[in-house]
């Protein structure tokens, strides 16, 4: 029998929603985890500014301190779990932990999407691991799937519902007819939303996660600043309803795709055919479609936020790091899936170059020639119409909504056509444009 190894000593930074879950899972499943990891994994020290709250959770089973820097420098800690969030202190703590030879497990997508390149380079230099399964889609093991399970494939594209809060809002608005603000408040109460909920609603959180997935899918550096980000705050009940009538559901999707000229990296509301499985990912759940050239489309589904699901990913990383701790650093799974000297400099495409289909809605004066003007502008811009519906005018209303679905078109051509349409005297206000993906 193998000689028993000493327990792995973990320092936990932050015992809030996710940290509390990590503490609970590690305690509850300690025996099972030990059987998997080959040795016990114990949180020996917790750093949290709310020390009394922390003590209330850990009792006398771990040391509680206020200064997180003490933990990352401690010689009695093997792995640091960073659950503080944000970019400033968290970044200093992670780098300091790495410089002190600690392995790091983090759920901090904002930090990795913006400073991941620097952090991974430092980790590489020091021969330590930075594990981040919990940073994308909570409990869904999508990082493991992309980095290892699909390693045989050339990944073609990823399309994911990767922000539970906005998906919850869209689902509740559609199903229950509830107003936006009320649903957001509920999501916050349940602990799904980011500290700054505009990150959820405006697509920033999804763009952080998409940046990470794109990097490991295509072997490129993290390039959050080049991601196109559009949220759900401007969606109207009318558009949600019209889309349903046409057989589509509106989802906030993160899409990254390899095309000839480069990589698309974009987050925006998207019409998805209702019959696709991913269109039926509802509430706070996340769903990610990954298309590999060999395997075809694969779908990953599960809870993308919340205490226990996110803890599930953090603890899985602890097990992974524990198993590999004695392995030669050169032969571990690379942070970004590809060998660090093999990253590609293929460019991220500007949004104008992206090709997709579009839902266009405009309010027009109901009189002869209006449709002819619209279709001429679209034809001149090489935009082909797939479907068109004129909605019934409301009672006493002389203006009507026209909804158009286009075939695939280049975004800059669509932008130009929208500008011209908005200048027509018969078109009232702005054209609503929502992108559409068949996801085949
Ligand atoms: N605010 C995020 C969400 C939490 O709503 O999905 C998980 O990253």
Image (cartoon, helix red, strand yellow):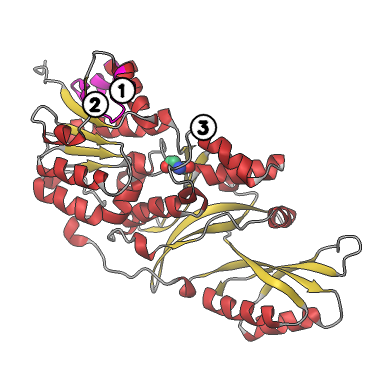
Q: Is mark 1 within 8 Å of ligand 1?
A: no
Q: Nearer the viewer, residue 15 or 143?
A: 15
Residue at the far top in the pictured view = 60
Read off the magenta span.
31-55
As drawn, is 283 to the left or to the right of 23? right
- Magenta stretch contains residue 96: no
* Residue 150 seen by the camera: no
How far apart marks 1 and 3 lie (CA) works out to: 20 Å
The residue depicted at 63 percent of the width and 40 percent of the height is 182
Instruction: Label 2: state its secondary structure.
Output: strand
Q: Position of residue 57 (x, y in %)?
A: 33, 18
Q: Which mark is residue 358?
A: none
- The residue pinned by badge 3 equals 190
Task: Give the position of the C terminus as an image quadrant.
Answer: bottom right
Q: Residue at x 53, y 75 (%)?
A: 410
> Pointer 1: what residue?
54
The answer to whether any part of residue 91 appears in the image is yes
Work out how far the residue at label 2 is from the one at label 3, CA to CA, in angstroms: 24 Å
Please tell me which residue lies in front, 79 or 45: 45
Q: Residue 87 appears at what percent x and percent y?
A: 29, 49
Tag 2 near tag 1, CB within 8 Å? yes
Q: Secondary structure at mark 3?
A: loop
**Residue at x 30%, y 55% (from the top left corner):** 114
Q: x, y percentage for residue 56?
A: 33, 17
Image quarter for residue 93? top left
């Amino acid at each position: 029998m193998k000689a028993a190894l000493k327990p792995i000593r973990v320092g936990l930074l932050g015992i809030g929603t996710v940290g509390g879950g990590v503490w609970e899972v590690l305690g509850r499943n300690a025996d099972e985890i030990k059987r998997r990891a080959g040795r016990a994994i114990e949180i020996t020290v917790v750093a949290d500014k709310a020390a009394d709250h922390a003590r209330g959770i850990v009792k006398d089973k771990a040391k509680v301190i206020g200064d997180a820097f003490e933990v990352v420098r401690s010689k009695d800690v093997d792995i640091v779990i960073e659950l503080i969030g944000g970019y400033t202190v968290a970044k200093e703590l992670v780098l300091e932990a790495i410089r002190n030879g600690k392995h790091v497990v983090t759920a901090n997508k904002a930090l990795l999407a913006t400073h991941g390149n620097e952090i991974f380079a430092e980790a590489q230099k020091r021969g330590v691991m930075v594990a981040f399964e919990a940073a994308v889609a909570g409990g869904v093991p999508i990082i493991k799937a992309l980095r290892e399970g699909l390693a045989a494939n050339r990944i073609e594209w990823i399309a994911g519902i990767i922000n539970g809060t906005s998906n919850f809002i869209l689902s509740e608005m559609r199903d229950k007819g509830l107003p936006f603000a009320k649903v957001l408040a509920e999501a916050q109460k349940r602990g799904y939303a980011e500290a700054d909920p505009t990150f959820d609603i405006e697509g920033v959180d999804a763009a952080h996660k998409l940046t990470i997935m794109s990097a490991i899918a295509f072997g490129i550096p993290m390039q959050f600043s080049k991601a196109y980000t559009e949220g759900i705050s401007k969606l109207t009940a009318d558009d949600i309803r019209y889309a349903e009538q046409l057989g589509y559901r509106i989802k906030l999707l993160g899409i990254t795709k390899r095309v000839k000229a480069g990589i698309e990296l974009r987050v925006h509301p998207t019409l998805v055919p209702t019959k696709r499985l991913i269109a039926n990912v509802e509430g706070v759940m996340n769903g990610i479609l990954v298309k590999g050239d060999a395997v075809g489309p694969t779908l990953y589904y599960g809870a993308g936020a919340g205490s226990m699901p996110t803890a599930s990913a953090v603890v899985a990383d602890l097990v992974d790091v524990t198993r590999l701790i004695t392995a030669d650093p050169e032969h571990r799974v690379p942070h970004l899936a590809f060998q660090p000297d093999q990253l590609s400099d293929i460019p991220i495409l500007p949004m104008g170059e992206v090709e997709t289909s579009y839902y266009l809605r405009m309010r027009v004066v109901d009189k002869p020639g209006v449709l002819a003007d619209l279709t001429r502008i679209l034809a001149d811009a090489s935009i082909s119409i797939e479907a068109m519906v004129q909605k019934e005018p409301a009672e006493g209303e002389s203006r009507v909504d026209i909804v158009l679905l286009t075939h695939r078109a280049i975004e800059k051509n669509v932008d130009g056509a929208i500008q011209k349409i908005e200048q027509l005297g018969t078109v009232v206000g702005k054209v609503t444009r929502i992108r559409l993906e068949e996801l085949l």
